[in-house]
Amino acid sequence: MMWQPDSFLALPEDVIAFAWSAPMRDLAKTIGISDVGLKKLLRTHDIVTPPQGHWNRVRAGRSVSAPPRPPARGPGASGRVRLDQRFRGHVPEAAPIAETGPFLTPLVPEDLAELRQLELESLGRVGVPRDLSRPPAGMAKLLRKEAERREKTATSRWSSDEPHFDGPLAQRQLRLLAGLLRALVKRGHSGEVWEDTYALRVRCKIGDETLGLRFEILGRHRTELRAGFERPAPDLPARTPLQLKLDRALRTPLVTSWQDTPERALETQMAEITADLVVAAEASFRQGLVEAREREEEHRRWLEERRQERLRQLSDKRLADLRTSGELLRRADEIRTLVARVENAILEGKNTDVTPEKLVRWKEWALRQADCIDPVVSGQVMEHLHVPDLDDDAEGNLPYPI
């Protein structure tokens, strides 16, 4: 479930209660969007809205169906809905599931080994198609691009215009992924195959978790430089041993890679791979709760370090300002002492060239200079009179580290 600034979590039942509390047009006004936009937004969170004519039946005093209960949390799902700040005050905020659980729902056992067994039983046999004549939806975009390249090749001499995945091994990879995506869809999940510079990548969406997969070739094999990247030679045979790996690093000891072996090819492991991915998604969700708490703790530590560093800076500046005050006061007092001695000398007749009027003007000017320097008179002393306080510090902003 993607984090967004100023967003918050809510229970699905509370969002459903909001969606069924008033006509969509009225609710949309309170949120500040159109009724069509609100309905679309709720649907992206799988929130069922009242059927057409619901509020006409209510106003007519006729019976209507009750709001539906939210479905049980499935594997990899957060059990929460993330809403933006426009919904604050309209839908109650909810805390995430505790990192210690319980995680048990009608669809998710507490024990991950039990979840794997349930998934295997529900999946049954999972096959790999012999060709790509009927690709799953998550592969259609990539195959359309390949078809466009194939057409372009007929009139182009550039090797870069050729299909990227027409080789025997790449075709086998695509068939394996087609079988995997079909199995995921069978279990209510989804996936997408995409290209990463002549390499196939997979995104599996299971609940609120997105898991990445990639192929690696086992053992030594020929490579070619393609678009500046070292890639397997496109004509490698289909029987080249493959490994399929999960990108997510999990702390729970789970199966996160699968490979061809002399006993079993990947084609015969699709049910286990799918079940393992579902388990990995649930483990990733649970681990994410721990990681969120760790990030929050790290952020608090970072803030405290920044705070202490800023306090040290303010304390050093206060001491420097104090020393400056002492130096300024010394200079101001020296000027005042000088004025007094000069005045006494002139009044005693030691310097008859200075008239009384000239002495008065000079004395006023010199004492003004002393007052300008004097830290008490000028107010410079206020720079260190108060204890440093970050609340009053204009530079004390402590943003989240980038």
Image (cartoon, helix red, strand yellow):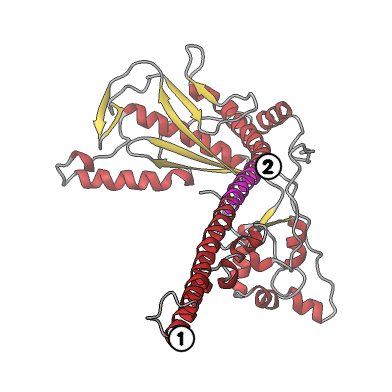
Marks 1 and 2 sit apart, C-alpha to C-alpha, by: 79 Å
In reply to whether residue 298 is colored magenta, the answer given is yes
Query: For residue 254, which quarter of the picture?
Result: top right
Q: Position of residue 385 (x, y in %)?
A: 65, 62
Q: Which residue is mark 1?
A: 356
Figure check: 274 above or below 24: above
**Callout 1 amino acid:** Pro
**Callout 2 amino acid:** Arg
Q: Residues within 10 Å of mark 2 (few under 14, many from 20)?
A: few
The residue positioned farthest toward the bottom in the image shown: 357
Q: Which residue is mark 2?
A: 293
Q: Residue at x 59, y 33 (%)?
A: 277
Q: Position of residue 171 (x, y in %)?
A: 37, 32
Say which of 391 and 277 sits in front: 391
Range drawn in magenta: 296-315
Query: For residue 326, which quarter of the picture?
Result: bottom right
| Drawn side of residue 346 relative to residue 60, left or right | left
Q: Position of residue 190 (x, y in %)?
A: 55, 44
Could you tell me if residue 372 is visible in this image? no
Say which of 221 and 327 sits in front: 327
In reply to whether residue 313 is colored magenta, the answer given is yes
| Drawn side of residue 371 relative to residue 120, left or right | left
Figure check: 79 above or below 395: above
